[in-house]
């Protein structure tokens, strides 16, 4: 397996065990401990993974009632092993959420970090944006995440600003990537 052979797929029941294993890895690293985070409650995922996948797919429709923009989720798999996830958030330029989280978010499971998957998943997401007619995106990362910063800069991300997110101790760096 290698990052070059990984591919984006839509969330699916086929990757249940890999997704749950990845969440457990993140939790051992101290992430996704708040069960209110979508997809972080391992017991709930084990009971009803189908509802979780259905919820991810339903998020593609904006919801004014829930106060969220349309978000399209992709999972990154290599030889049918779940490696990570990414999403595209359909923010408009004046939407305040764009400043905090950006258009594209991505995450690689801890056991696969440092193997080129972060670079590969962001590149695959940029390719995925071209048919949508998207000419540029904002991608954010925490200031204490040098790996993500290098990935974003490798794809041509230009630093725009460092911002404070209410309730967080780490500043967030905002980058713009123009899609050729």
Image (cartoon, grey):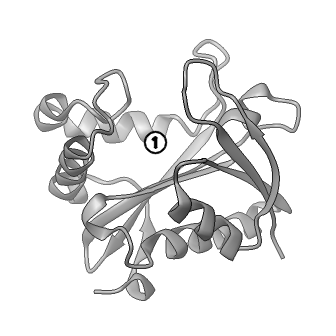
Residue at 41%, 82% (x, y): give it. Answer: 3
Residue at 83%, 59% (x, y): give it. Answer: 136
- The image quadrant that residue 66 belongs to is top right
Percent coordinates x, y for residue 86 in the rendering: 50, 55
Residue at 76%, 55% (x, y): give it. Answer: 175
Say which of 49 and 29 sits in front: 29
Report whether 162 appears left or right of 110.
Answer: right
Q: Quadrant of the N terminus?
A: bottom left
Q: 115 above or below 111?
A: below
Report whether 156 appears left or right of 121.
Answer: right
Percent coordinates x, y for residue 33 in the rendering: 28, 30
Residue at label 1? 57
Q: Quadrant of the C terminus?
A: bottom right
Quick check: can you spot residue 20?
yes
- The image quadrant that residue 108 belongs to is bottom left
At mark 1, the secondary structure is helix
Residue at 38%, 28% (x, y): give it. Answer: 37
């Amino acid at each position: 397996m290698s990052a070059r052979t990984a591919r984006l797929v839509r969330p699916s029941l086929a990757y249940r065990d890999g997704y749950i294993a990845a969440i457990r890895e993140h939790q051992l690293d101290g992430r996704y401990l708040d069960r209110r985070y979508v997809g972080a409650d391992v017991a709930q995922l084990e009971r009803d993974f189908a509802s979780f996948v259905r919820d991810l797919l339903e998020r593609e429709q904006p919801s004014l009632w829930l106060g969220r923009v349309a978000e399209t989720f992709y999972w990154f798999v290599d030889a049918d092993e779940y490696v990570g996830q990414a999403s595209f958030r359909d923010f408009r330029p004046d939407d305040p959420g764009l400043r905090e989280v950006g258009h594209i978010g991505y995450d690689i499971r801890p056991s696969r970090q440092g193997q080129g998957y972060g670079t590969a998943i962001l590149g695959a997401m940029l390719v995925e944006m071209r048919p949508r007619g998207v000419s540029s995106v904002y991608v954010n990362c925490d200031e204490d995440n040098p790996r993500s910063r290098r990935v974003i800069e490798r794809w041509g991300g230009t630093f725009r600003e460092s911002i404070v997110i209410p309730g967080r101790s780490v500043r967030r760096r905002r980058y713009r990537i123009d899609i050729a």
